[in-house]
Amino acid sequence: MKEEELKQIFLAEAQDSFEELNRLFTQLEKNHSDREATEAIFRIIHTIKGNAAAMGFEDVASIGHLLEDIFSEIRKGKIILTSMVFNDLFKAIDKLGEMIVGIKEDKKVPYKGLRAKLKVILRNLKGEIEFEATQGGESSEEKDQALDEILSQKKELSEEHKEEILASEQPVPIGVPLAEEFKEESSDKKSKITFSDFVQVPVSKLDTLLNLVGELAIEKDRIIAQGASIGATNEYTRLYRITSDLQYSVMGVRLVQVGALFHKFHRIVRDVATLEGKKVNLQLEGTEIEIDRNVLQIISDSMIHLVRNAVSHGIESPEERIKKGKNPEGTILLRASSDKEYVIIEVIDDGNGVNVEKVRKKVLEKGLATHDALSTLSDDDIVKFIFEPGFSSVDNVTSVSGRGVGMDVVKKAVDAVGGKINTKTELGKGTTFSLSLPSSMAVKSALLFVINETEYAIPLSFTEAVISVKKSEIHKVGNGLVTSHLEETISVMFLRDIFECKEPDDLTAPHLLHRSFDEIDDHESKINIVVVSVDNRMIGFVVDRLLQQKEIIEKPLGKPVENARFISGATILGNGNVCLVLDANDISEFLFKPVFATV
Amino acid sequence: MNLEEPNELPSSNDDKMASAVEMNRIETEQEKKSNIIVFRLGEEEYGLHIDQIKEVVITPRITKVPLTPSYVKGVANIRGNILAIIDLEDKFSLNRTISETSGYTLVVESHEYNMAILVKDVPNTLSVADTDIDYSPSVVADMQGEHDYINGIIKIDDRLIILIDIFKIITKEDLKPVIGA
């Protein structure tokens, strides 16, 4: 299945390249010294060759290789193109096209003759045996031909040329009966126009499509809700099914294989390792796992950062590794696996691990937490500080990493797509960063509730429980509020307190979080709390009313409100209203921010 | 996003250009007419180039966004797009005449911004010869000092229309409160 898909992608690309080559060759034929075209041809042929070799299509690869040789010489200016060679080059390209079709239809295309021919051309050109411009008349005529005419005319020309080529090539001994093979070729050569089975679509078009489907889903909800009120639910089952199918199909179109990103790391790892004088072996697992293209794009920079970090800070130098009794060659494993709605991407290195004591020292130095606070934290919690802005555990700034920006950016990117990041590290053994990312950004389950007559949503991935407590069970502790849930003490906040702030400065007003709490007179009145868990911290959000659990399509807010605090995006409800989606990470950050805690 | 006027044309009369380097962005040939959308804010008439506007809709229900400047009224659903709703009367400190629950919304056409601005009535379009637009910096510069969102002044008969560039109204300064600490 996977193999087949790769083949399809290869064929689609090859087909495109083939058409592009045809265009470039005609361009080059008109102007032999067109450097741009030469470069482009070389690049394309190189790609075809590489892809074909990787896919095991030896025939395409071998022709590609020869063409590449020829063009590499041309590029370097070592040989000069003559009009005559073009006929053979065109033939070679046609052959390449046939081969691509051959792969598709599982048909062998004879190519040995052509290969010999190309070798001859290469040898002749290299030997600086320039072909006599005997065909000058023809070629100048040919130059004036329109693009399409050249293609059809070529067939006739090739007949004539064949003799001439053979004549002119007499001095070169060739082991293959060229004439026969070429004859056979030209006879079954058809000017067939083939279309790729793939369509390239700009992502923006898919976004529009997804938007429309999102709207449709909202309308569907509205109509079904209406129908339910008059007891006509069955009428809508088909509508429901079709819209759901449509929605998932569109989402499916946006999925790409993680491998698209993973394969780029071979080069990155190599470059960083060379720079740092380390030996690193990159392994990939689960490259076929599919994930939303936009998610992949957003986290790609973070992945680069993590991998570079792993090479630069994780893996030790070969000498050090030998001293420790490790294989001098370090290993970095990129692994993808899927877990329900999530894709887990892990960056695993077998390097030195994160030194928790160092981190602890750094945290104190930077004043990111107090000594007392730190002493209560587990090692795992302390390691989390590497994701704090302004933290960098490396003393020396290198050109690769270690400027103290980065890890916090990684976390931000992961937060932005609604994912989570976990770190496991063992001193001397290595570190694992695991990113759990939504496989599709389009749809997520969320809990809807009302505060101040405004609807809000919070992704279910954050919610732990919904509880109801009496006012008397909530206690003021410092500037905040706490209550207990399942024997655990959790922070409680009235979201309206922070949402009613007009200025960012208001957020630091003393006793801000007590305001709404103080307004409640009745100690017995029930307070609804949605318990969310962020970074293993539990926070209870007080809500006025709970609505429902629902699949929402979250859209990011655009300019000028794209950076609005506490909000990660918005969705449109069945009633047409915009419902803001809470950014639990940001709220948690605000709540536990040292600045606030010390007010 | 290009903040300059899309209908900018290379001008041939260089000497004229030299005097108004900053404000000549929409300077075109003498005979050229511009279509301007005119609407009332407070007691004044304001104008926008028609190509900055996508459509006019009845103001939808607005959802407030916490911790945004007061002129950002919130976000609303306009044809499936979530747009920020901007109140320019608030922004320009003019007399309030616009209601959020009645009235109309001008949807701004842009790749960069998702926003719309509140207006009281359905705006008119006006075809203005470029000669009627006063771009001279002396008029414009001292109006707001640091802000250069005023493109020019249109004087037709007794009317005075302030031509603004909607994309310059939202500046980084303004977004500070949004971005937060």
Image: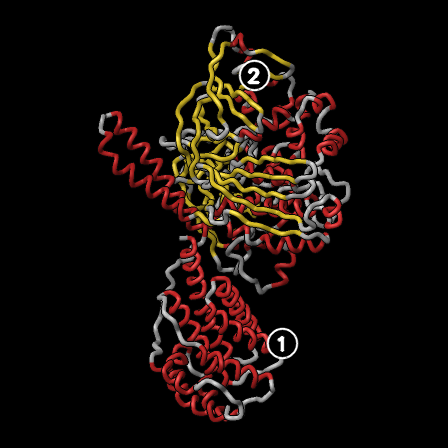
Q: Which mark is residue A488?
A: 2
Image-based side of A587 in relation to A162, left or right: right
Letter of the chain that mark 1 sits on in the rendering: A
Q: Along the line of sight, which residue is nearer the eye, A429 or B14?
A: A429
In the rendering, at what x and y percent does residue A11 appear?
Answer: 42, 63
Q: Secondary structure at mark 2?
A: strand
Percent from the top left, x then y, of residue B96? 50, 29
Q: Earlier in the sequence, mark 1 or mark 2?
A: 1
Local secondary structure at mark 1: loop
Up the image or down, A210 lies above or below A469; here it is below
Percent of width and height locating residue A94: 42, 75
Q: Are marks 1 and 2 in contact (CB under 8 Å)?
A: no
In the rendered image, the vertical position of residue A13 relative to residue A507, given as above or below: below
- Nearer the observer, disc 1 or disc 2? 2
Front position in the image: B59 or A90: A90
- Tell me what residue is drawn at x 42 percent, y 77 percent: A147
Q: Dot 1, crowdedness within 10 Å: few (<14), some or many (≥20)? A: few
Q: Is residue A153 left or right of residue A116?
A: left
User: In the picture shown, does residue A105 fall above or below A501?
Assistant: below
Q: Quadrant of residue A122?
A: bottom right
Task: Name the chain letter of the residue that bears numbered label 2.
Answer: A
Relative placement, left or right, of A284 versus A95 is right
**Which label is found at residue A76?**
1
Q: Residues under labels 1 and 2: Cα distance?
A: 73 Å
**What amino acid is labelled 2 in the image?**
Glu
Q: Nearer the viewer, residue A344 or A197?
A: A344
The amino acid beneath tag 1 is: Lys
Badge 1 and badge 2 both on one subunit? yes
